[in-house]
Image (cartoon, rainbow, N blue to C red):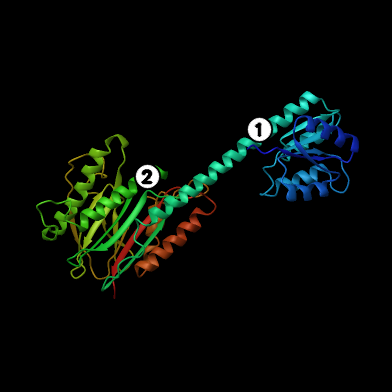
């Protein structure tokens, strides 16, 4: 059942109020009235009218002051206001429009114009209210999506004997295309990854869950390797199996979607420090020595996954020294933008390395540096990094 619109008439001249009440009653609108700006403000707060007809010249609080107060209040600013003024007060009308009035009505009132202006303003408010309900519904759905997506990311990293591990993850929107994972394999080795699905928003988030689930399941179970025992695979063969299976499934099954993900994935032997890795189109993982200098860059060993079916991915090895710190990250760090549209870049990241003795120091300093650099700008891309180092 449609609610009868309620219109507040604000005018200190009884004749004008009586006339408007009669016209609006004929048009089947509910009316309330106020004789000054303060009285009107109180009624706007308590009665929540659908529309205000506002005379500019009034005692106690004039119409323009009332208009400023209403438009400055987030809870009231969407109520449409039509200013009422004599034809010779055009400057005041212009000021009212500049302050946020929806429209104006000249005195003396013309019934047809009165009806048209009121109906137009109420229709705009109806559409605005519908839009607000839709946006609230969308926000609710996005909040649900964010909570579901959070379940796909590890709540905490595994505790590794003899190693420190830290991560930083910050989504640019309600849901993210970036993801990370870290888990122990049955043989005690440590698998970790950072990845970035192309695009933004819901589409990237949906494919993020697909990529992450495929990679995690293919890494930890034999269900995707019929006739083979996953535990018998070398680290290199296991990574090739995981990455190739994920790549082929997405490229073949979701060819029309044209979705892909860059990934850095590694298996670390916690005793020897030997790292086996595949870099599928991702930023190079960096190996930083004790002095904060880059000792090695673990560059691309194949294209992004999900693009070209049957791609042969090469797994490489690197032996981490006791003082080496590894940092794997997505392009959200170097590509971060500030208010001047400058990028954070690689050098700002590299400059932080000498200041950091362990992974936690590094992630904390990167988070702080990125926050200071972004400032008032909107975060442009998801940010994901994972770092590790042998404990002293």
Front residue of 34 and 318:
34
The picture places residue 191, in percent across and down from the top left corner, at 24, 61
User: How far apart are the alpha carbons under marks 1 and 2?
Assistant: 37 Å
The picture places residue 32, in percent across and down from the top left corner, at 79, 42
Front residue of 386 and 103:
103
Residue 368's tag is none
Ranked by sequence position, the earlier of labels 1 and 2 is: 1
**Rendering quarter of residue 312:** top left
Q: Give the farthest residue toward the left.
A: 227
Quadrant of the frame with the N terminus: top right
Q: Residue at x 73, y 46 (%)?
A: 70
Q: Give the farthest residue toward the bottom.
A: 392
Front residue of 181 and 366:
181
Q: Give the farthest residue toward the front.
A: 1
Residue 330 appears in view:
no
- Secondary structure category for the residue under label 1: helix
> Disc 1 vs disc 2: which is toward the camera?
1
The picture places residue 56, in percent across and down from the top left corner, at 83, 39
Q: Which residue is mark 1?
A: 123
Q: Which residue is mark 2?
A: 204
Question: As drawn, is 40 to the left or to the right of 337?
Answer: right
Question: As drawn, is 177 to the left or to the right of 182?
Answer: right
Q: Is residue 18 above or below residue 293?
A: above
- Secondary structure category for the residue under label 2: helix
Q: Is residue 245 above or below residue 153?
A: above
Quadrant of the frame with the C terminus: bottom left
Q: Residue at x 34, y 48 (%)?
A: 208
Question: As drawn, is 327 to the left or to the right of 244?
Answer: right
């Amino acid at each position: 059942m449609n609610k009868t619109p309620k219109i507040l008439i604000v005018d200190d001249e009884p004749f004008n109020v009586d006339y408007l009440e009669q016209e609006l009653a004929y048009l089947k609108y509910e009316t309330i009235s106020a004789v000054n700006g303060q009285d009107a403000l109180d009624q706007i707060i308590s009665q929540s009218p659908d529309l205000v007809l506002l005379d500019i010249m009034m005692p106690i609080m004039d119409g323009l002051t009332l208009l400023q107060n209403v438009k400055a209040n987030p809870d009231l600013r969407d109520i449409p206001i039509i200013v009422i003024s004599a034809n010779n007060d055009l400057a005041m009308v212009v000021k009212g429009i500049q302050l946020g009035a929806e429209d104006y009505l000249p005195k003396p009132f013309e019934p047809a114009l009165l009806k048209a202006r009121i109906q137009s303003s109420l229709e705009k408010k109806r559409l605005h209210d519908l839009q607000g309900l839709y946006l609230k519904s969308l926000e609710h759905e996005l909040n649900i999506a964010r909570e579901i997506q959070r379940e796909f990311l590890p709540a905490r990293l595994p505790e590794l004997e003899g190693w420190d591990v830290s991560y930083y993850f910050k989504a640019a929107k309600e849901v993210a295309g970036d993801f990370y994972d870290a888990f122990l394999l049955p043989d005690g080795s440590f698998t970790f990854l950072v990845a970035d699905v192309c695009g933004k928003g819901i589409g990237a988030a949906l494919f993020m869950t697909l990529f992450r689930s495929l990679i995690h399941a293919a890494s930890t179970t034999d269900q995707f390797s019929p006739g083979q025992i996953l535990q018998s695979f070398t680290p290199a063969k296991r990574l090739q199996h995981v990455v190739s299976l994920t790549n082929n499934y997405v490229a073949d099954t979701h060819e029309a979607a044209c979705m892909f993900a860059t990934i850095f994935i590694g298996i670390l032997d916690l005793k020897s420090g030997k790292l086996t890795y595949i870099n599928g189109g991702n930023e190079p993982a960096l190996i930083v020595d004790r002095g904060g200098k880059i000792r090695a860059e673990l560059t691309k060993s194949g294209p992004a996954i999900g693009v070209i079916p049957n791609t042969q991915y090469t797994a490489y090895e690197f032996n981490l020294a006791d003082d080496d710190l590894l940092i794997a990250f997505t392009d959200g760090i170097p590509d971060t933008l500030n208010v001047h549209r400058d990028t954070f870049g690689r050098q700002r990241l590299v400059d932080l390395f000498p200041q950091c003795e362990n992974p936690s120091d590094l992630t904390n300093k990167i988070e702080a540096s990125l926050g200071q650099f972004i400032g008032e700008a909107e975060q442009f891309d998801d940010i994901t990094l994972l770092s590790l180092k042998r404990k002293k």
